[in-house]
Image: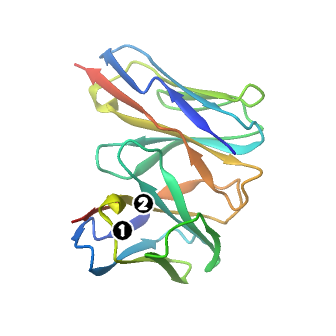
Amino acid sequence: KQEVTQIPAALSVPEGENLVLNCSFTDSAIYNLQWFRQDPGKGLTSLLLIQSSQREQTSGRLNASLDKSSGRSTLYIAASQPGDSATYLCAVSTVKAAGNKLTFGGGTRVLVKP
Amino acid sequence: ETGVTQTPRHLVMGMTNKKSLKCEQHLGHNAMYWYKQSAKKPLELMFVYNFKEQTENNSVPSRFSPECPNSSHLFLHLHTLQPEDSALYLCASAEGGFASYEQYFGPGTRLTVT
C-alpha cells in the first residue's frame, strides 16, 4: 500500500528565504506526482505535475524535482513571499492503484513572515 | 463558470437529515472524484467515476451515496450522518480515469454534522 510522507509538518521562514519542502513515497512504481497548494478552508490548487519519466518541473519561482528510484520529491520555492503562506500537499498516482487514484501526504504548513 | 464548482460551500445538518452535495466541472473531463479531508488526516479518496460509471468505492459507509448522471455532474447524497463525518468534501475531475492525467479540484463543501 502506497504511503506518502511530508516533512516537516510545519515551517516558518522570514520573507525572502527559499523554501524547501520534502515528500517521500514508499512505492516507487508511480505514474506521476502532483504538488498542490491549499489555503485555509479552501480547495486545492495544482502547482506542478511531474510525470514518472521526468526529473523536474518548473513554474515561475517554483521548482519540483523527482527521484523516483529513491521515492522522493522536493518542492523549492524561491524568494518566499507572505502570499506563499499556505499548506502544500504532494500526491502520487500509483501504478498498482488503477483509475488515477491519488494518495496524499499529510501536508506541510508554511508561514512566511513579513 | 470555469473549472470545478461545488455547492453548497458550507452545510450544517443534523444526524437525521438528508442532504446532497453537488459538483460540476466545466472542463470537458470524463472522470470525477469525491475526496474527504478531516482535521489532522490526509486527504482520502472516497469514490471514482469514469465515463459515468463508478470504478472505485474506497470502503465508504453506505450513508454516503454518490450519483453521476453525466460526465459533468457528480452528487454525494448524505443521510443519517455521524458527527465524525464533519469534514471538507472535495470534488475533482480529470481528463480520463487513467493515471497520467492531472486532477483539478473544486473549492470544497465544509460539512458540519450536529
Give the percent coordinates (x, y) of residue B104: 51, 57
Going by the image, does A113 lie left or right of A69?
Answer: left
Residue at x 69% of width, y 34% of height: A26
Q: Is residue B114 above or below residue A40?
A: below
Amino acid type of the residue tagged 1 in the rendering? Gln
Sort mark 2 into few (<14), some (14-19) or many (20+) by Cα contacts within 10 Å: many
Amino acid type of the residue tagged 2 in the rendering? Leu
Going by the image, does B10 lie left or right of A95?
Answer: left
Residue at x 52% of width, y 30% of height: A6
Closer to the chain start, of discs 2 and 1, is: 1
Q: Chain of mark 1?
A: B
Give A79 or A69, whichever is nearer the viewer: A69
Pointer 2 and pointer 1: residues touching (CB < 8 Å)? yes
Give the percent coordinates (x, y) of residue B31: 60, 69
Q: Is residue B1 above or below residue A87?
A: below
- Mark 2 or 1: in front is 2
Give the percent coordinates (x, y) of residue A108: 43, 31
Instruction: Kindly identify which residue carries mark 1.
Output: B6
Instruction: Kindly identify which residue carries mark 2.
Output: B90
Q: Is residue A57 above or below residue B42?
A: above
